[in-house]
Amino acid sequence: MSQYLITGAAGFIGSHLCEALLAEGHRVVGLDCFIPYYPRAAKETNLTALRDREGFSFIEADLRADPLHEIVADCDAVFHLAAMPGLVKSWSDFQLYSSCNLEATQRLLDAVRDRNVPHFIHVSTSSVYGREATGPETSELHPFSPYGITKLAAEGLCHAYHANFGVPFTILRYFSVYGPRQRPDMAYHLLIEALLNGESFPMHGDGEQTRSNTFVSDCVRATMLAAAHREAALGRTFNVGGGEVVSLNQVVTLLEELTGCTARIERKPPRPGDQKHTQADITQARERLGYEPMVGVREGLTAQVEWHRRPRSGGAA
Ligand SMILES: NC(=O)c1ccc[n+]([C@@H]2O[C@H](COP(=O)([O-])OP(=O)(O)OC[C@H]3O[C@@H](n4cnc5c(N)ncnc54)[C@H](O)[C@@H]3O)[C@@H](O)[C@H]2O)c1
């Protein structure tokens, strides 16, 4: 049994990770400051299954400002998921992205170094590759949005803290994660809500953009494998993706079938910074961590549609 700190615990992926670690019998400290990028009520709902769980404690703290040393002191690993995600807003509020993605990571790394935390698992993104993300981890990195640039700079901090102070780190680059509790700004969330409510869905681009979708339980499993195989993971960067690549047009067709509703597509130009194709090369995660995605797109979207259909407070778009 280990003790873990999860930053971004009230968010989409962080809340699932907390639940999965608790289910394995670990002690989990969740941290979040409820950045109002989407409503706090949705994040509180993400935490409902966690609040009363034995072994779970929650700290409301801002990584940019609050003292962190005591929080990390007894942790066997820190899973750093807290960030400002989503690329669109990163063009108009760069300060928020640079402070939450970069300064926050630097303050956390300081604390991890000073308290000798044995493993810093840093969550990054396929956006660090650029307009296309189709190769292995050694591919060239040309981020195409301010979001991707801040996430790449945060990766750089991990390397710098390792090179200068020996901070033991692993970087995980997630590829388009989906499933229950998906963030309300993400395409599948918006599309499913539009279908179920008979509203139009703004499609940016021709819909032929493809994504290496990762179901949230696969993403969480890969993340936990990085901690479980610490020696194999140390100092390395891993792509974390799903097995299937689909275009947005294919997803529209599939979701029409799963919801029984017809999509009303509102054509929009591509947005600055949008990726065209992503296809995660997970060879390294497969070989070193034993990671294998298990949930296909049909099964994963079925679970997400079911979640959207459930009555809940605060979570809907
Ligand atoms: N969702 C995806 O498809 C995807 C893809 C690639 C990478 N990622 C990465 O995965 C991580 C989690 O993403 P998500 O989709 O769950 O996002 P999310 O917004 O649902 O969760 C992130 C959480 O971090 C918190 N946070 C942000 N800044 C903070 C700060 N300064 N102090 C404390 N808490 C802070 C927010 O309040 C939020 O609850 C992020 O690092 C993101 O860049 C996500």
Image (spheres, rainbow, N blue to C red):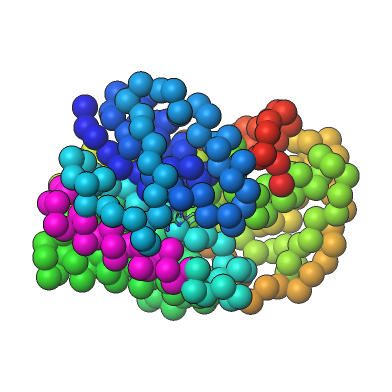
Q: Is residue 110 visible?
A: yes
Up-down relation of residue 260 to residue 115 (above or below): above
- Residue 280 in the image: x percent, y percent? 45, 57
Q: Nearer the viewer, residue 195 or 240?
A: 195
Residue range corresponding to the magenta coloring:
97-118
Q: Which secondary structure class fits the magenta region best?
A: helix
Residue at point 51% right, 49% down? 34
Q: Please tell me whether residue 223 is drawn above or below residue 142 in the rendered image.
A: above
Give coordinates of residue 236: x percent, y percent.
24, 58
Q: Nearer the viewer, residue 214 or 36?
A: 36
Is residue 162 inside the magenta stretch?
no
Give the residue drawn at x 29%, y 65%: 106
Going by the image, does 10 lie left or right of 183?
Answer: left
Give residue 262's position: percent from left, percent from top. 87, 45
Magenta includes 113?
A: yes
21 left or right of 232 in image? right
Residue at point 38%, 41% (across, down): 59
